[in-house]
Image (cartoon, rainbow, N blue to C red):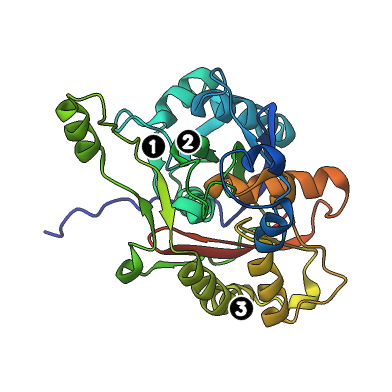
Amino acid sequence: MSKPQIRPATGAQFSRILGVGGYRPVRVIPNAEVLEWIDSSDEWIRTRSGIAERRWAGPEETVAEMSVQAAGKAIAQAGIDPAQIGGVIVATVSHLKQTPAIATEIAQRLGCGTAPAFDISAACAGFGYGLGLADGMIRAGGAEYVLVIGVERLSDLTDQSDRSTAFIFGDGAGAAIVGPSDTPGIGKVIWGSDGSQKDVISQTQAWDTAFAKADAVNGPGDETKWPALRMEGQTVFRWAVWEMAKVAQQALDAAGITADQLGAFIPHQANMRITDAMIKALKLPDSVPVARDISETGNTSAASIPLAMERMLESGEARSGDLALIIGFGAGLVYAAAVVTLP
């Protein structure tokens, strides 16, 4: 007697991004305000990073609230009902509760029914990781539509006295609806990690260490510092410039696309100099528009790619149906790159 066989799951042959949306906090932090915290200059910050200003969230602009606002725009653009969403993936490193996942609250507020909802911690590569997971879920039959959100409140983890990082980070949320497609809309995601360099971007101390110190505070001169982000800037810069250009090229090759066929290049908004170096390494033609959202938004980690994508589409720099190369890279160290069709 033959053994019973599991019925295979089947889904759409291909997937694509159907809608994108973003949310930028109201409060603008210009470089002039940052200079009240650190000994620097506007010229130094612009030259070193390309940042002129960034957005910081207010008390009501929580991780969940920013995500709901961004997701609402993506859902409207995709033309679907929230109840059709079969999965909610939230990429973030700044939701300060270990559990439950903030994705469950977001799914409930949006009206996604009983859709599976979970958070992923992949830093600045989080949106790319989310796209890879969404693509797999749709093609395996796990969901018809998946909501991918990248959201950060990095102002909560910024040490305003740290001259090397105080000017870098911003807050915001970007969201995308991924759904079935008759043609390939998301190329092979080239993703990976290098845990040997886990310490070059990290939180200054674990929560248990911070709380233990807080419990021990008993003198007027004692001060417990909130855990913050730290970064070995030169190490990260060299890694991003030399290694991520190779990953970006692998994504192009995997998709069967050449640089001159792109309609946009949307890298993680980490540093304008890194972007310029990658453009040169990829031999990207001048005709290909490049996202430079960092100048007004700062580094928003997992939110940076969808925020930059939305801005390019709204401004007309990029057009619906264009092919875009996206790449994210950051703490871990982790990375993810792919060629996608813009919604």
Residue 259: give x, y in percent of width and height: 74, 76
Identify the amino acid type marked 2.
Val
Choose the circle earlier in sequence order: 2 or 1.
2
Does residue 186 show up?
A: yes
Q: Residue at x 77, y 62 (%)?
A: 290
Does residue 184 show up?
A: no
Residue 166: give x, y in percent of width and height: 54, 46
How far apart marks 3 and 2 lie (CA) works out to 29 Å
How far apart marks 3 and 1 lie (CA) works out to 30 Å
> Which residue was labeled with disc 2?
88
Residue 273: give x, y in percent of width and height: 67, 68
Q: Residue at x 72, y 51 (%)?
A: 42
Choose the circle earlier in sequence order: 3 or 1.
1
Q: Residues within 10 Å of mark 3 (few under 14, many from 20)?
A: many
Q: SS of the residue at dot 2?
A: strand
**Residue 118, disc:** 1
Is residue 305 placed above or below 258 in the rendered structure? above
Judge by depth and name the residue closer to the eye, 320 or 42: 42
Left or right? Give the position of 208 relative to 29. left
Residue 206: give x, y in percent of width and height: 26, 43
> Which residue was labeled with disc 3?
249
Left or right? Give the position of 107 relative to 326. left
Judge by depth and name the residue closer to the eye, 296 or 316: 296
Q: SS of the residue at dot 1?
A: strand
Identify the amino acid type marked 3.
Gln
Q: Residue at x 53, y 50 (%)?
A: 127
Judge by depth and name the residue closer to the eye, 264 or 140: 264
Q: Residues within 10 Å of mark 2 (few under 14, many from 20)?
A: many
